[in-house]
Image (tube, helix red, strand yellow):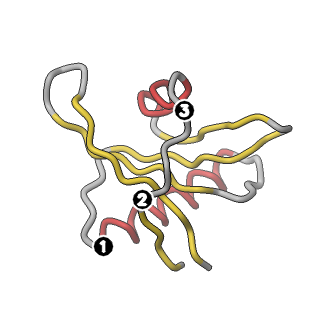
Amino acid sequence: MKINFAHIRERSTSGGWINFAVFEANSTSGSDSANAQVLADLTNKTQLAGYKIDQSALAFMRQGRLTFYGTKNLVDYLSKQRLPSWTHSITV
């Protein structure tokens, strides 16, 4: 299965750089433990493919609303932004 993701590098509030990935999730089970496992697996596979990732999140629709699951600071940031454009894909 092909998963789209955005790999982005932005300046952090502390002045350094942060590399993050946002993965497209077509559906989720709704449970935090399942979402956490999917996110960990996608992050690990993407890092093994050579991408630097400091924080990551899943993006999915829940009850017609865009929802994010992942690192709290990244989820807070994404919630105030538009969904990033997919820049890459990975096969799982």
Circle 2 Cα neighbour tier, 10 Å, few/some/many (<14 / 14–19 / ≥20): few
Q: Which label sits on residue 82?
A: 3
Q: Quadrant of residue 51?
A: bottom left
In percent of the image, x 44 and y 53: which residue is there? 6
**Above or below, comparing residue 75 to residue 4 in the picture:** above
Q: Residue furthest left?
A: 16
**Above or below, comparing residue 40 to residue 1 in the picture:** above
Q: Identify the amino acid type marked 3.
A: Arg
In percent of the image, x 22 and y 30: which residue is there? 11
In percent of the image, x 37 and y 67: which residue is there? 46
Mark 3 or mark 2, which has the lower sequence index? 3
The residue wearing badge 1 is 48
Judging depth in this view, the residue of 70 and 17 nearest the camera is 17
What is the secondary structure assignment of the residue under circle 2? Answer: loop
**As drawn, is 67 to the left or to the right of 17?**
right
Which quarter shows the C terminus?
bottom right
Instruction: Mark 3 and mark 2 in contact? Answer it, CB < 8 Å.
Output: no
Q: Identify the amino acid type marked 1.
A: Leu
**As drawn, is 2 to the left or to the right of 49?**
right
Q: Identify the amino acid type marked 2.
A: Thr
Q: Which label sits on residue 87?
A: 2
**Above or below, comparing residue 44 to residue 68 in the picture:** below
The answer for how far apart the CA atoms under marks 1 and 2 are is: 17 Å
Mark 3 or mark 1, which has the lower sequence index? 1
- Residue 76 pos. (x, y %): 49, 24
The answer for how far apart the CA atoms under marks 3 and 2 are is: 15 Å
- Residue 89 pos. (x, y %): 47, 69
What is the secondary structure assignment of the residue under circle 3? Answer: loop
What is the secondary structure assignment of the residue under circle 1? Answer: helix
